[in-house]
Amino acid sequence: MSTKLKDLLRTSDLSKSDVELLLETAGKFASNPLRSKKTLAKKTVAIYMTKSSTRTRLASETAVAHLGGTPIFLRADELQIGRGETISDTAKIISGFCSALIVRTFSQSDVDELGKNASIPVINALTDDDHPTQLLADWITLKENFGKSISNRKFAYVGDGNNVSTAWLIMGATMGAHIVVATPGGKWAPNENVIKQANEIAKKSGAKIEILTDAKSAAKNASAIYTDVWMSMGDSESDRAEKMSALKPFMVTPELMSLTSSDSIFMHCLPAHRGEEVSAEVIDGPKSVVFRQAFHRRTTIQALLYHLSKGDLKGNS
């Protein structure tokens, strides 16, 4: 008996075939956003966020609307959860009114608990640990630029070993890619358990995983250079000076980009701090695809809602 993936709680929930299906559908939504405008007709989707948002909120509300549904945006201080109602009770209440729940918050365990107790699909739209919806947008952007053949290409992430680096490692491993993550050593390196998980996935998929501490080595002949802000929401301000100093050699500059392949692209999940993790010349230059990535936040969330609502995704179980 085949299983169905109810929720997307982590990047690792998705199989390669799931990702390929989602990207195929997202590509269709990119050219014709209203092609499935009755999928969520007369239905509502809750969008619960405890972190501020530009792209995720716009993408989520637009995706729901393009599927014919009504988005309901919620913040913690607008719900009884802000006064102590349990996550479990909240999940059950939302399930009684809505057809799906999109969550952007700090703790991964909160998203896990919502998924466990909700009877509707729950989508992780960012936690401190992971960012699966971002990686779907990233991967369709890679596909648009390089096609399906990635066997001779290297995709590199440089900077802070944060939730985006986690998702980058897991998605790259799942898709059988050559993935490099270069960060400072120590507390700003990727989580050891994540590295182990990526390597386990890579054994089955044929992916190549490299963890480095040198940005230039990561950039050499890379087809894509990816970075993220150095101070994420929730990071301690007391760490700022130390963290900025440690990450300074990982700034994406024209010099770093010059080491990449001739057809390379620059990627960033945004928002960006020009002069910190990336120079203005790079992010505003001809190799930058950051606004295409942002555009695909909508197409991929729309694809997720479409396929989760139909029970089309199988997951890794």
Image (cartoon, rainbow, N blue to C red):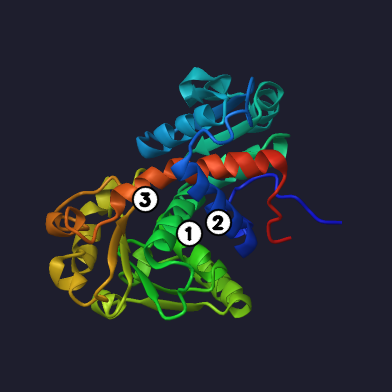
First in sequence, mark 2 or 1: give its number: 2
Looking at the rendered structure, which numbered label has been put on residue 293? Answer: 3
Q: Please say if 53 is above or below 108.
A: above
Which one is nearer the viewer's eye here, 113 or 208? 208
Q: Amino acid at mark 2?
A: Thr
Mark 2 and mark 1 in contact? Answer it, CB < 8 Å: yes
Q: Which residue is mark 2?
A: 11
Whole-number angstrom distance, CA of label 2 to CA of label 1: 6 Å
Which residue is pictured at 50% across the width and 42% down the height? 29
**Horizontal side, residue 130 vs residue 272: left or right:** right
- From where the camera sits, is residue 235 visible? no
- In the figure, is residue 116 to the left or right of 131? right
Coordinates of residue 148 in the picture (x, y in percent)? 49, 68
Q: Residue type at mark 1?
A: Ala
Q: Amino acid at mark 3?
A: Gln
Which badge, 3 or 1, is on the more N-terminal residue? Answer: 1
Work out which residue is located at the far right of the displayed protein and give it: 1
- Say which residue appears at 30% left-offset and 47% top-offset: 291
Up-down relation of residue 34 to residue 240 (above or below) = above
Q: Say which label, 3 or 2, has the lower sequence index.
A: 2
Q: Please provide percent x and percent y for residue 92.
A: 70, 28
Quadrant where the image shows the C terminus = bottom right
Mark nearest the camera among 3 and 1 is 3
How crowded is the residue under tag 2: few (<14 C-alpha within 10 Å), some, or many (20+)?
A: many
In this figure, which residue is indicated by the disc labeled 1?
167
